[in-house]
Image: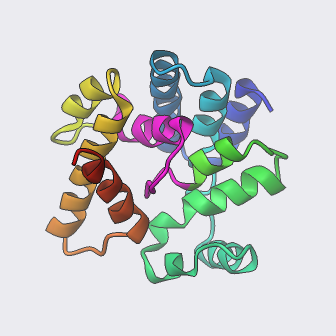
Amino acid sequence: MDLEQAKRLVKEILPEKRYIHTLGVIESAQYLAEKHNVSIEDAELAAALHDMAKFHDKQEMRRVIIENNLDPVLLDFHHELWHAPVGAVFAKDKFGIINEDVLNAIKYHTTGRPQMSQLEKVIYLADYIEPGRKFSGVENVRAVAGQDLNEAMKIALKQSIEFLISKYQPVFPDTLSGYNEYVQKEK
């Protein structure tokens, strides 16, 4: 599957606003991949497919998580997190994507995790900083991401955790573990 095929596919699935977001993630992923010597083709494909399950039926996503032995802890968290791992399953099963790095970039684009590959970081950050994002602190992460993926990940994970805590929302364990990894590397 190439970028144009992936874009046509998600355009049929996603509402226009989410499709525009996806185009922004592709643009940001291309930029970050080129800056950090990551496969641009892999980044484009993962970016195009990253939200493919975003508007899928919640009960169906629950079934996919259970039947594919995905982390059962996901089911203890808001269904908003489910689309990423379910999207990776769909990318593999429905569209024949076999590149594990692309699948993991889709799978962990909402939570992050420890030991992320460069491609996983590119997609996590591209989703975080795409041109449509307008929240406080995004400009700083955009600037840092062009220079240092690890520093940008540390800042983005910190901001995400702070946002969730400010809303009294639980923080997924992989997000905390990912943040801890970046902070502990500095010691």
**Count of numbered labels shown in the rendering:** 0
Residue 77 figure quarter: bottom left
Q: What residue appears at the point 67 percent right and 48 percent down from the top-left corner?
A: 103
Q: Is residue 55 visible?
A: no
Which one is in front, 18 or 184? 184
Q: Quadrant of the N terminus?
A: top right
Is residue 27 on the magenta stretch? Answer: no
The quadrant where residue 6 appears:
top right
Determine whether, in the image, residue 146 is placed left or right of residue 24: left
Lateral position of residue 43 relative to residue 131, left or right? right
Give the image location of residue 126, x and y in percent.
43, 34
Name the residue located 69 percent from the left edge and 79 percent from the top edge. 63
Figure coloring: rainbow
The answer to whether residue 109 is magenta is yes
Please state which of residues 55 and 174 is positioned toward the viewer in this rendering. 174
| Rendered residue at 43%/64% (across/down) | 174
Q: Position of residue 52 (x, y in %)?
A: 63, 50
Left/right of residue 170 with respect to residue 108 in the rendered view = left
- Is residue 91 at all visible to an observer of this figure? yes
Q: Which is nearer the eye, 132 or 84? A: 84
Residue 72, horizontal then vertical, whole percent: 57, 81
Residue 14 against residue 146 in the figure, above or below: below
71 or 55: nearer the eye?
Answer: 71
Residue 166 is situated, as x and y percent measured from the top left of the image, at 14, 66
Residue displayed at 51% across by 16% down: 34
Work out whether 95 lies above or below 41.
below
**Numbered range of the magenta stretch:** 108-133
